[in-house]
Amino acid sequence: MTNPLVIFMPSGKRGHFAPGTPVLTAARQLGVDLDSVCGGRGICSKCQVQPGEGTFSKLGVTVAPGALSEFNAVEQRYDEKRGLKPGRRLGCQACIQGDVVLDVPPESQVHRQVVRKAASDKPIVMDPATRLHFVTVEEPDMDAPTGDLERLRGALATEWDLHDLTLPLPLLRSLQPVLRQGKWQVTVAVNHDENTVTALYPGLRDAPLFGLAIDLGSTTIAAHLCDLSTGEVRASGGVMNPQIRFGEDLMSRVSYSMMNPGGDVEMTTVVRAALDTLATELAAEAGITATDIVEAVIVCNPVMHHLLLGIDPVELGQSPFALATSDALRLGARDIDMGAVAPAARVYILPCIAGHVGADAAAVALAEAPDQADALTLIVDVGTNAEIILGNRDRLLACSSPTGPAFEGAQISSGQRAAPGAIERVQIDPVTKEPRFRVIGSDLWSDDPGFAAATEGSGITGICGSGIIEAVAEMRTAGIVDANGLIGSAEQTGTPRSEPTGRTHGYLLWEGDDRRIMVTQGDIRAIQLAKSALYAGARLLMDEAGVDGVEKITLAGAFGAHISPHHAMVLGMIPDAALDKVTSAGNAAGHGARMALCNRAARGHIEALVRRIEKIETAVAPRFQEHFVAANAIPHATAPFPHLPTLPDVNFNTASEGRARGRRRR
Amino acid sequence: MTNPLVIFMPSGKRGHFAPGTPVLTAARQLGVDLDSVCGGRGICSKCQVQPGEGTFSKLGVTVAPGALSEFNAVEQRYDEKRGLKPGRRLGCQACIQGDVVLDVPPESQVHRQVVRKAASDKPIVMDPATRLHFVTVEEPDMDAPTGDLERLRGALATEWDLHDLTLPLPLLRSLQPVLRQGKWQVTVAVNHDENTVTALYPGLRDAPLFGLAIDLGSTTIAAHLCDLSTGEVRASGGVMNPQIRFGEDLMSRVSYSMMNPGGDVEMTTVVRAALDTLATELAAEAGITATDIVEAVIVCNPVMHHLLLGIDPVELGQSPFALATSDALRLGARDIDMGAVAPAARVYILPCIAGHVGADAAAVALAEAPDQADALTLIVDVGTNAEIILGNRDRLLACSSPTGPAFEGAQISSGQRAAPGAIERVQIDPVTKEPRFRVIGSDLWSDDPGFAAATEGSGITGICGSGIIEAVAEMRTAGIVDANGLIGSAEQTGTPRSEPTGRTHGYLLWEGDDRRIMVTQGDIRAIQLAKSALYAGARLLMDEAGVDGVEKITLAGAFGAHISPHHAMVLGMIPDAALDKVTSAGNAAGHGARMALCNRAARGHIEALVRRIEKIETAVAPRFQEHFVAANAIPHATAPFPHLPTLPDVNFNTASEGRARGRRRR
């Protein structure tokens, strides 16, 4: 007589098992993804299954009553104490008696899929480095006087096949009280990526553990606090990077370190303290204990990377921009002074791609997965330094380009950070040349009724990065700015908003009682420098790849999420492409960090991928300068932009060709 | 035609090599022990060899002139700058041209034998965990922007076949400046036991590195500072264990921790600080920089072990005496707050045998190697707690016995630590019953002319441990004390030095102007308790081994070195044995630590050996109490001591059998 047939759903894995085989045993033998923390003792309830009833014609099996053993005493006790959903069984207690179909609900799967947070986020399949393992440790025996640690190791080897685990000194200190408090039962948090124990809990730990996915930027440190079993983001937040007081951008911080002996140590100290503060705040927001955070994944640019690690970034400020280390790093949280989290918590830092292309760019590559795409994809992470990746499954190239802070509102006459009151969207009527705009904090346009009331609180305080990009692009589209970036006079443009400002002109965007917001000729020049650098970087990679166009463009970064693809293309920030192929990836670096936190395999993947990426150094590429000069025009001196509508062929350089000639260019 | 024959001496390894083969290459291929730090660049001079000349009839070879290539430019430069001994050649430069006999001088051997410090010290063959490796690192290249660390790893892999080395964070911080200072040449100190880098030096480091062999005792912390290439002890010293203020002996420190929350942390803090101080002092004494200390080996008893690691020793104070961890430990020096040594220095702590038998006993086993002996050996490490090991190559047993501090002069009416002025040796004339003695600080006996002058500085201040043992044994031999440990009255013993002290008697050893040094009945009782515990422990192991006697006795420990075997046997501290088979091993624990420091293989050896040792817990063995009671008599109530001279059969218990009966016992 054949043994009963067992089919697990949704995987469809099936096999025959002798009557009396526990469901958990069958699942393990078939490689079915069924969780267990207590190792089959009927106390953790992670291995719950839902047996089907009746005929499953598709599967060709009929489940008779009594296909599983009776609800036993262990299950009854669990049900009374904690409650089992109707029909649910504990996989370690229920034994197979006859043919049966067993549904593994998502919460019983280790490798469950994380619900996407943003539509743009790639799905994450849970496979966290940190797992909980419940064991019973042999009590000490004077006649075989091994240490408590050695007996714990023995139990982990016997019950979980875990060998040669490291137990850091801070945990060794707590081992004896924990074992005695738990009456020789203990739940061990193991980081399987490093084969090290990260926490010990007396008895069975039922509560989840947490990890931080940290995007350590030059300006902002943003983090997600994630449940390491479900992947759920329990709290998100950010703090300013306190290094700002040592310099707004990366190179000014490198300079600070060069000019001030010990300056790097100061910057290391403040950024580490900020990480610790952020961990504490997010834990409080989620209502958890910060010491339940056992892991962190950090992505950052190379200068932040070195300063976090306590390495003077001086070499990153000069050719050949040598990184102290480029590989991924696995550290103790205490090594970087994170004192709020679990004492033995681990930190994983993604690999850097090159001296100017950091772990943040690696995280973007991980999140956006151009290596898995057929389409030739250009990924642009816009910031003070832009990271640019080009390629597809065949080949990947990367570079960084020094765009400067103009895209973030700095070096702009009315520029400001993205904050309530900042103009973020701009439209200019091509006929009347009159502008309308929206400010952060209100969904109304400036010509909508109620706009004044809606913005009374914030006021209208300046223009942020996305606002200045739209303003310049709209000015170009409306014929207020020519291809060379010159703002025309009132006479040339036909609008009194073109005002003379010394030897050049400015365009008045808004005038309040005590404030006038203008786009000046200097602003246009700053934006031209920034966008030329960005375009030239992309173009350099395209040269290297031997292509003249790309099939897909992804704008990454918190700022990238707010850029209008149309306006970016009018400006010539990015190469020409079909507008529907230009998308925003949101905070791709942060999402990449979260992937590496929730999925161990993602770490190996990005480590291998980074080695495959070809790095192009813009600072010394002779063609970069050439591309940079040609990209100064709006949108470009020579490159065609067939996907753009025709732009006015105006020229306000009276010194050379005089007034607009009415000729159109594409 | 056959290739030239090359014979290396003293190993005698030989082989034929093509003309032009460098001597170093030939040595490596033959597995000859020829050192090299620079990897064959002719700059470290570690690979020096001395070619022979003429006919070597025993070896069957004649060395003609021109057997090696001419002294080349590299050798000339080295000779001019640093000087080569006459006839010496650099093995990496000199090439084989004809049959040759090459002598490898001891200083060119890695595995040279360390000259013994004490006659009792077992020889150590150098095979240190730490080795220096000189490499040239590829300069950074913007087109292949790997980190400096990754290129260093590459060089270590290519030039030295070293892979997956860990580089701790503190070294990562110094990597970039070191590489640039050394113009991309760097000497890397690698700890091969842990596959980790422990120090980086720009260019070629020619100077030796150092290690500490530390014997962390309850009372004294002693250490040797060793040159890690020659094994030479460059400085030795000790400091008091500052934990003494929390309790004289181990159990009182455990009690302090139990009674005072946080008491363990206090004790951890002070002992770690003391280690750091000791490292600084020894470095100063040797005239080296403390940061050139890249390794330490520590041996200690379990309570010291736990307190050093920051583990509350409370479990060691109560049955079942569970160790938090028993295996050997490999830690960073910074993990135990050793701040004076190299930032990435490593610490190796020997395994513990049991809850009462620590890493110090393991070190004794390593140094004394009973596992390699045919003779059944009893090793006794005498201290507040005595560690006892019994066995030979077939089987090893170990236990500890709570002797208390009497052997160290505590609990003795005139007891004191071993220090100048303490009586350390005693003789009593069996006829006159008059004593003579020696004190620490003078080689004269008290009845020698000049004794008073010689001891004027120190005075005669008390009796130390070895002194009280000799005093009691001599009193027994002279018939002043009977087998039960009773001191007879002046009438019974025939000497006025027997003085009544309340209901018992004391023996006046010395009388000065302001001080009288007596051995009281209470002192005898304290020594009886201590020696009974020691004997009972040894006897328990003999029971377990099924033997009635041992073939060899080794007294270990700093104190053990000062005990007279004859007196110890008269007391019945140790079982009967031929006196020439009772030897002192000096500070065997400290020597074991030095072995583990200088020879990597010794670590693996002791780790394996400890697992083989059978542990006997005296505290719960029913026969221990029985043995203890029987051992109370001097030398013993029932066990024969055939190797002792006959002792006076006196009995001073007037309540029972009255005066001495004149019968002799053996």
Image (cartoon, coloured by chain):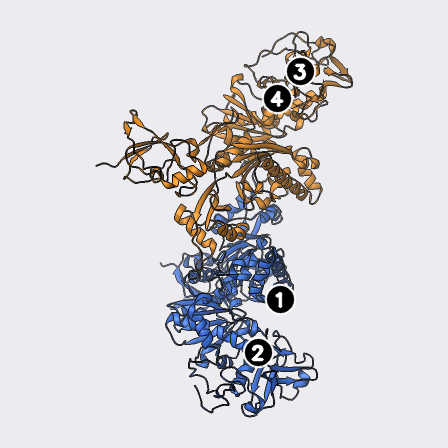
Chain colours: A orange, B blue
Q: Dot 2: few (<14), some (14–19), or many (≥20) neighbours within 10 Å?
A: many
How packed mark 4 is, by other alpha carbons closer than 10 Å (few <14, some 14-19, many 20 or more), is: many
Residue B580, image x, y percentages: 46, 80
Find the distance from the CA under tag 1 to the CA under tag 4: 75 Å
Of tags 3 and 4, which is closer to the observer? 3
Mark 1 residue type: Met
Kind of residue sitting beneath label 4:
Ala
Cα separation, mark 4 vs mark 2, equals 99 Å
Alpha-carbon span between mark 3 and mark 4: 27 Å
Quarter of the picture containing the N terminus of chain B is bottom left
Alpha-carbon distance for marks 3 and 1? 78 Å
Q: Earlier in the sequence, mark 1 or mark 2?
A: 1
Q: Dot 4 lies on which element?
A: loop
The C terminus of chain B: image quadrant: bottom left
Query: Residue at 42% of width from left, 52% of height from top?
Result: A154
Amino acid type for the residue under numbered disc 2: Asp
Residue B523: give its label: 2
Q: Nearer the viewer, residue A408 or A32?
A: A32
Badge 4 vs badge 2, beta-carbon distance below 8 Å? no
For disc 1, the marked residue is: B240
According to the image, label 3 marks what residue?
A: A437
Q: Which mark's residue is nearer the viewer, 1 or 4?
A: 1
Q: Chain of mark 1?
A: B
Q: Position of residue B480 (x, y in %)?
A: 54, 87
Label 4 belongs to which residue?
A631
Residues at marks 1 and 4, common chain? no
Residue closer to the observer: A12 or B543: B543
